[in-house]
Amino acid sequence: MKSEVSIFWFRRDLRIQDNRGLHAALASGYPVLPVFVFDRELTRGTDGPFDRRVDYVHQVIKCLDARLREHGSGIFAEPGTPVAVFQKLCEKYDIKAVFCNREYEPTAIARDEMVRKWAVEKGIAFHDEKDHVIFERDEVMSQGNTPYSVFSAYARTWKSRLSQADYQELRSPVDRFFGFVPPPVPSLRDIGFEKTGISLQPLEPEPGRIANYAQCRDYPAVDGTSRLSVALRFGTVSVRRCVAVAIRYSETWLNELIWREFFMQVLYHFPRVERECFKPAYESIRWRNNEAEFEQWCEGRTGYALVDAGMAELNETGYMHNRVRMVTASFLTKHLLIDWRWGEAYFAQKLTDYERSSNVGNWQWVAGCGCDAAPYFRVFNPAEQMKKFDRELMYVRRWNPGFEIKKPMVDHEFARKRALEVYRAGVQWYKSPV
């Protein structure tokens, strides 16, 4: 007879403790078979075979598998599509239920609906839990029961609703996993990728680092950020643990965690913003979209020291300091008048911590076309930003040696004036009567 099991489907929640979906699976009454799918649909758009995100996830899966093997279990990990992998498991096991944690991006929602439909047809229960966020979907709404489009109002309501129970840690027993000898985790090469040199980042917020976050976060030469963006993206750290530490040590970092949830709910309620400006008027902007200039920006050859340093850091490491992300994005959209979607797509290829909702939200914020955006007439001056946040040029010298001899590709005052004219014309054209 086939063994009766519940499946827990790991996705972007790569940890055993304080995992809501896994906790529910372990309480289901059936031994839990852990599964991870190297989903070909989700890895198709990655940046070639040397993709840091896939490498990072692969390392985490191997670590989780090793830990579970110490308790007589392991992770069934296989490339393919979720439905195909689950169908294969059905031939060997009597699957009673599939458990996972909810996701909120359009592609993930569509994928999960396919799995839910398959499960219903097979007579298998499908359960998804809230885990990636403190509040989701319709839990933080305006008094008119509509989704917020202004962060400050959203954050006030978010904080007013928060109770200790919302960030209480869950401890899960490790003796309820299905006992079996899983096949080895496929190698990176088996799934079409190669090693990149990335290594696992810290998996827990450091109180000292978080306590100094507000004072240090804007200075790219200082190691003053949480360094947890990749861990949050792939769920190797619990958001509840992060919120608990933020409440104790840093209101500023707590606000950043709320920004993350704000952008998630914006994309969930307004999926069009994945490819469209939140403010329709800004679809009328006449972008220049000069491909040669875009290539200069991608390669860090703009002649603006801070911009080029940021792009060099991104291209070499898959990471860019958040202050520098704002400056480089502003330069692309305002100085060069290149569509924010071009920059968003490039960051999507390169960033190890890439999260679609936050990336789209932040690009639209900088471009002035998103919800709760910076006004379009706010144009960062890269030279002044460098003087303010990298006065000693430590960051610039690290990532952009020889910057003194590079000529700016466009004059700041000229570019600023041009951007204001183009933005103003686009908005006025939208508002003018036909």
Image (spheres, rainbow, N blue to C red):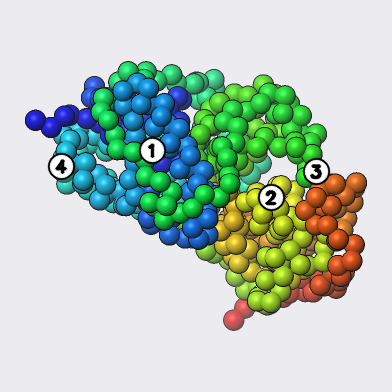
Q: Are marks 4 and 2 in contact (CB under 8 Å)?
A: no
Crowding near the residue tagged with mark 3, few <14, some 14–19, many ≥20 C-alpha atoms within 10 Å: some
* Residue 136 left/right relative to 196: left
Say which residue appears at 59% left-offset and 36% top-offset: 201
**Which labelled disc corresponds to residue 94?**
none
The image shows residue 333 at horizontal and vertical percentages of 70, 66
Residue 388 shown left or right of residue 122 in the figure? right
Q: Amino acid at mark 4?
A: Glu
From this view, report whether residue 86 is shown above or below residue 364. Answer: above
Whether label 3 touches label 1, CB < 8 Å: no
Looking at the rendered structure, which numbered label has been put on residue 91?
4
- Regarding mark 4 in the picture, which secondary structure is present there? loop
Judging depth in this view, the residue of 181 and 261 nearest the camera is 181
Residue hosting label 1: 10
Between the residue at mark 4 and the residue at mark 1, the CA separation in whole angstroms equals 20 Å
Alpha carbons under labels 4 and 2: distance apart: 46 Å
Q: Nearer the viewer, residue 202 or 67?
A: 67
Dot 4 and dot 3 residues touching (CB under 8 Å): no
- The label number, if any, that marks residue 221 in the structure image: 3
**Of callouts 2 and 1, which one flags the residue occurring earlier in the amino acid sequence?**
1
The residue positioned 52% from the left and 49% from the top of the image is 195
Q: Which residue is mark 2?
A: 320
Real-space Cα separation, disc 4 to disc 3, in angstroms: 55 Å
Say above or below: 28 vs 409.
above
Location of residue 56 in the rendering, given as x and y in whole percent from the top left corner: 51, 43
Q: Quadrant of the N terminus?
A: top left
